[in-house]
Amino acid sequence: MAGSTSQKPIKKARYDIEAARQSVAQRTRGAWLGATSGLARVDAYRRAVESAQTRLDATTIGHEVGARTTLDLLNAQADLFRAMRELSQAKYQVLLARLALARAAGELGDDALAAVNANLTRR
C-alpha cells in the first residue's frame, strides 16, 4: 500500500503538466486565429474606408450642385469616421493578438514590445 500512495503525487504532477501543456496550446491557437483573422478584418476595413471616402466625395459634389442635402453630407462623413474608427480598432486588436501569440510562444520580450510600440507611433 505504501507504493500506491507514493505514486499519487507523481500522477498528479503528470496530469498538471498535461493540463498546462493543453492550456498553452489552446492559448497559442487562439492567439494565432486572432492574429490571422484580424489581418483579414483590417483588409476589409481598409476597403470600407476607401468606399466611405468615395461616397463622401460623391456626396460632397452632390451637395455643391444642390442634389444632396447637408444631412446626406453629414451622414456620409459619419460613415467615413465610423469606418476609420473600426479600422483603427481592428489594427489595435491585431497588435494585441500578436503580443498574445508572442507570450504564448514564450517569445514576449523587449523586441516584440518595441515592434508594437513602433507600429503604434507610426499611426
Image (spheres, rainbow, N blue to C red):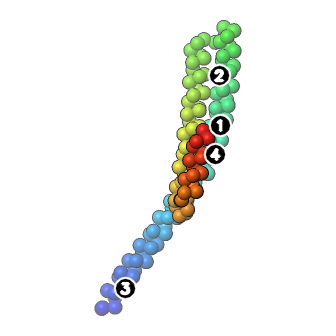
Which residue has dot 1 on it? Answer: 46
Distance (Cα) linking label 1 and label 4: 10 Å
Instruction: Label 3, secondary structure: give it.
Output: helix
Query: For the residue carrying disc 2, how many other residues have a C-alpha within 10 Å: few (<14), some (14-19), or many (20+)?
Result: many
Question: Nearer the observer, disc 1 or disc 4?
Answer: 1
Q: Check whether the beta carbons of the residues at disc 3 and disc 2 lie within 8 A of each other.
A: no
Comparing 107 with 22, the one in front is 107
**Mark 2 or mark 1, which is nearer the start of the sequence?**
1
Q: Which three-letter amino acid code belongs to the residue tagged 3?
A: Gln
Which residue has dot 4 on it? Answer: 40
Q: Check whether the beta carbons of the residues at disc 1 and disc 4 lie within 8 A of each other.
A: no
Which residue has dot 3 on it? Answer: 7
Q: Check whether the beta carbons of the residues at disc 1 and disc 2 lie within 8 A of each other.
A: no
Q: Which three-letter amino acid code belongs to the residue tagged 4?
A: Ala
**Mark 1 or mark 3, which is nearer the start of the sequence?**
3
Q: Is residue 28 visible?
A: no
Residue in the image at 39% along x and 82% along y = 10
Distance (Cα) linking label 3 and label 2: 72 Å
Which residue has dot 2 on it? Answer: 56
